[in-house]
Image: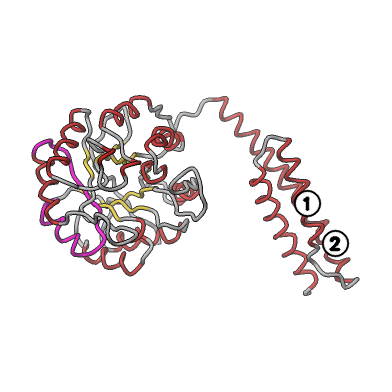
């Protein structure tokens, strides 16, 4: 099923990407208005704040609920900015419509649940609002696309994806691993779908926001959603990843926006070279697989098992060392040769089972 996408029609300045900014949580009326007024003075048009806060464990601040929607109304009235929040249930949607919010987003935990997504889609039937869908917590592109398809079937066409990274058990630099190839594959499959980067949740630390913003621009993302707070160190949730409006404005002023469509002759020539090397690489792989099939026939005729652990380890060690000498990442080389070995085994299995 294809996605039927219409433009978001959300305001942005010509010299910078679409920017949605505001605090992680709507804490107090004063905090909301203070942050919103500072953002409006910096030229921001879109304000975000979490009204309901799904926490990993109970006991933390879980949002002010409906009361905070009145604060969003005041932000809209006093600054002229459009306002939005996260929704996770049909009841949330009903209240947001009651208080005339301009956009909604769906969080990673909700995106991962098809039952919850279908309930939200049903509650949004016939509603013409921009709906932004965060990636699920696991790197599952089909689940992400499926969530947007459910909304599309309900008539929601002003859709965008938010890339907020993926959860991982390991200790790491980022709070959520970017795994950029997932949103890039989404762009390839649904080129008309806007993709917005959430550097706050990817990084988890305010010092990582600026480089992540630039990386998103370098990759051709359409916008940014950044947690911004008037006094971030005192924030009631996710204080480490929030920045002030002044810092946000500084980060945006330094962004270099790439021209996706500019085709200069030198790049075209480089791409021709890559195409030629790819062609040579495919020919070499084909020759390698022919040898693997010959080995498969020998193993079949001499009753030898397909998998030889010592030989496989030898390949991984030697090719990893060669890759490092050539300036390539060892993990990349390991992944590449694991995939090649998997195909070699498959071809030998076909021969032995003939």
First along the sequence among labels 1 and 2: 2
Residue hosting label 1: 315
Q: Position of residue 10 (x, y in %)?
A: 24, 41
Residue hosting label 2: 295
Label 1 element class: helix
Q: Position of residue 270 (x, y in %)?
A: 61, 30
314 with respect to 88 (left or right): right
Q: Quadrant of the N terminus?
A: bottom left
38 with respect to 327 (left or right): left
How is this picture coloured? secondary structure
- Hey, which quadrant is residue 9 in on the image? top left
Q: Quadrant of the C terminus?
A: bottom right
Q: Position of residue 191 (x, y in %)?
A: 42, 46
The magenta span reads: 78-100
Q: Nearer the viewer, residue 229 or 131?
A: 229
What residue lies at 16% left-to-right and 50% top-to-bottom?
A: 101
């Amino acid at each position: 099923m294809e996605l039927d996408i219409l433009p978001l029609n959300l305001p942005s300045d010509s010299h910078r990407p679409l920017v949605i900014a505001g605090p992680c949580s709507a804490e107090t009326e004063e905090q909301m208005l203070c942050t919103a007024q500072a953002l409006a003075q910096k030229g921001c048009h879109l304000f975000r704040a979490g009204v309901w806060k799904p926490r990993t464990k109970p006991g933390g601040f879980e949002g002010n609920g409906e009361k905070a929607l009145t604060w969003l109304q005041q932000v809209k009235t006093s600054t002229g900015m459009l306002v939005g929040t996260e929704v996770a249930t049909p009841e949330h949607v009903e209240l947001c419509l009651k208080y005339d919010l301009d956009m909604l987003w769906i969080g990673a935990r909700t995106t991962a649940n098809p039952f919850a997504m279908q309930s939200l889609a049903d509650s949004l039937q016939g509603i013409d609002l921009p709906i932004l869908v965060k990636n699920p917590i696991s790197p599952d592109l089909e689940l992400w696309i499926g969530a947007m398809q459910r909304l599309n079937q309900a008539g929601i066409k002003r859709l965008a994806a938010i890339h907020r990274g993926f959860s991982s058990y390991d200790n790491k630099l980022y709070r959520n691993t970017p795994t950029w190839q997932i949103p890039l594959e989404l762009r390839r499959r649904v080129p008309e779908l806007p993709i917005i980067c959430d550097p706050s949740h990817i990084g988890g630390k305010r010092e990582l926001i600026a480089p992540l913003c630039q990386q998103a621009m370098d990759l051709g993302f359409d916008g940014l959603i950044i947690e911004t707070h008037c006094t971030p160190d005192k924030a009631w949730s996710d204080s480490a990843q929030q920045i002030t409006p002044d810092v946000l404005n500084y980060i945006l002023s330094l962004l270099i926006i790439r021209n996706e469509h500019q085709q200069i002759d030198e790049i075209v020539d480089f791409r021709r070279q890559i195409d030629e090397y790819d062609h040579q690489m495919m020919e070499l792989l084909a020759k390698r697989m022919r040898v693997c099939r010959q080995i498969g026939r020998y193993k079949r005729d001499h009753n030898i098992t397909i998998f030889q652990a010592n030989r496989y380890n030898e390949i991984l060690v030697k090719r990893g060392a060669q890759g490092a000498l050539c300036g390539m990442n060892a993990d990349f080389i390991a992944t590449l040769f694991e995939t090649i070995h998997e195909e070699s085994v498959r071809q030998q299995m076909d021969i032995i089972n003939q």
